[in-house]
Image (cartoon, rainbow, N blue to C red):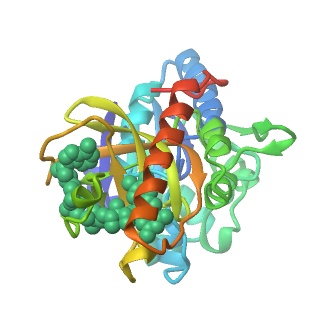
């Protein structure tokens, strides 16, 4: 996959002129619905002998249009790019999104951006697709403005699961409710959060359960406080693990952390990158009256997590990793 990123001027210089078979959107999570749309796009791109292209925006338009909202991304940009490449997308275009682009009328977006930059042979988007200032542009706008180019504008009806549309907001809601299995099923892969191991208060090893501490990335969707059955990749090895998310109320107020214990592992991992894959919520966060009570609970949490991971069944298309 080739990635082109930047503002309009940069893309005008760098992106080969097309024509392309394209889609447009944020594709946060690259969930089952996105994957269905992409597979349709790839089929059509092949029959038109055009490269498949996804036009996406960075940052996510909501960060520009509603900067005060508590909107959180399901997936990091880096991981999104990897997954899109693995699925077979040929060209990813990440257009810098700013207030000027947000204010562009739908018609102008077609005539100044879509037509000259991509010469689209085909645009495939969900039937509810809206674009341009005030979200006033529709599929009809696309068809009308691009009719002279002979562009095929194709609406796709939403991909359903259990009678409901699969959507990024449905996945966010499932995660917020601790329904990790449901989120993973819609994503077709485990929810993941990664980052470097940072130093904590060095208390974990005294408790007998050292933990890899991860600072939650800004604007990222994080499951609610509690304990989770997870798998953790560190230095290329995947470990079954137990992860605590919270503010450690037993020890006073702390800023939220994501802490993972790898049973049976020993070694120094400060500064090393690690990826935590979430499978199941074991329990909620609690404050314990003393350290012994917390230790007993952590031992039982680790047991529950390992048992869950051992019994995990291959469900639908959720890869157990
Ligand atoms: C599986 C697991 C469950 C935990 N559950 C709780 C909890 O419910 N309440 C709490 O205050 N701390 C909980 N902890 C966090 C410990 O308080 C934390 O690991 C310890 O304070 C070490 O902190 P440090 O990494 O800064 O040294 C849990 C830790 C683990 C590994
Ligand atoms: N089994 C293990 N699981 C997690 N971390 C471990 C393990 N064994 C050793 N470590 C190391 O111990 C560190 C955590 O120890 P801990 O006392 O909890 O310190 P901190 O408060 O800095 O997290 C980790 O960052 C890692 O380098």
What is the x, y in percent for residue 149? 59, 40
Q: Position of residue 100 (x, y in %)?
A: 44, 76
Which picture quadrant has residue 304? top right
- Relative placement, left or right, of 106 versus 242 is right
Residue 238 image offset from top left, x and y in percent:
32, 30
Residue 244 at least partly seen: no
Judge from the rendering whether residue 31 lies leftward or rightward of residue 294; answer left or right: right
- Work out whether 163 lies above or below 226: above
Q: Residue at x 36, y 36 (%)?
A: 82
Residue 89, x across and y down, in percent: 44, 30
Is 13 left or right of 27, judged from the image as shown?
A: left
Q: Name the one closer to the observer, 159 or 128.
A: 159
Quarter of the picture holding the C terminus: top left
Q: In this view of the protein, which residue sits in the foreground, 121 or 216? A: 216
Task: Locate the N terminus by quadrant.
Answer: top left
Residue 171 or 145: which is nearer the viewer? Answer: 171
Q: Residue at x 23, y 30 (%)?
A: 236
Residue 320 falls left or right of residue 260: right
Residue 73 seen by the camera: yes
């Amino acid at each position: 996959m080739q990635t082109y990123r930047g503002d309009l001027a940069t893309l005008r210089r760098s992106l080969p002129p097309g024509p392309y078979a394209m889609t447009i959107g944020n594709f946060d999570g690259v969930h089952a619905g996105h994957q269905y749309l992409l597979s349709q796009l790839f089929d059509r791109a092949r029959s038109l002998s055009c490269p498949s292209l996804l036009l996406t925006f960075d940052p996510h338009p909501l960060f520009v249009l509603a900067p005060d909202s508590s909107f959180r991304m399901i997936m990091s940009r880096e991981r999104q790019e990897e997954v899109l490449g693995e699925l077979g997308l040929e060209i990813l275009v990440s257009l810098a999104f700013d207030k000027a682009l947000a204010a562009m009328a739908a018609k102008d977006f077609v005539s100044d951006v879509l037509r000259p930059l991509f010469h689209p042979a085909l645009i495939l988007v969900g039937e509810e697709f809206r674009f341009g200032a005030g979200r006033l542009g529709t599929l009809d706008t696309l068809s009308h403005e691009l009719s002279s180019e002979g562009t095929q504008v194709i609406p796709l009806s939403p991909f359903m699961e259990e009678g409901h549309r699969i959507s990024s907001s449905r996945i966010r809601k499932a995660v917020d409710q601790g329904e990790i299995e449901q989120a993973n099923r819609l994503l077709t892969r485990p929810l993941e959060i990664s980052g470097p191991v940072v130093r904590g208060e060095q208390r974990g090893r005294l408790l007998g359960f050292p933990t890899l501490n991860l600072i939650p990335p800004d604007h990222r969707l994080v499951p609610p406080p509690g304990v989770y059955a997870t798998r953790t990749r560190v230095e290329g090895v995947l470990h079954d693990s137990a992860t605590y998310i919270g503010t450690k109320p037993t020890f006073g107020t702390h800023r939220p952390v994501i802490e993972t214990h790898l049973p049976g592992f020993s070694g120094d991992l400060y500064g090393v990158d690690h990826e935590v894959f979430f499978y199941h919520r074991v329990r909620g966060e609690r404050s314990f009256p003393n350290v012994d009570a917390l230790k007993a609970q952590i031992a039982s949490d680790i047991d529950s997590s390992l048992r869950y991971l051992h019994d995990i069944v291959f469900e639908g298309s959720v890869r157990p990793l």
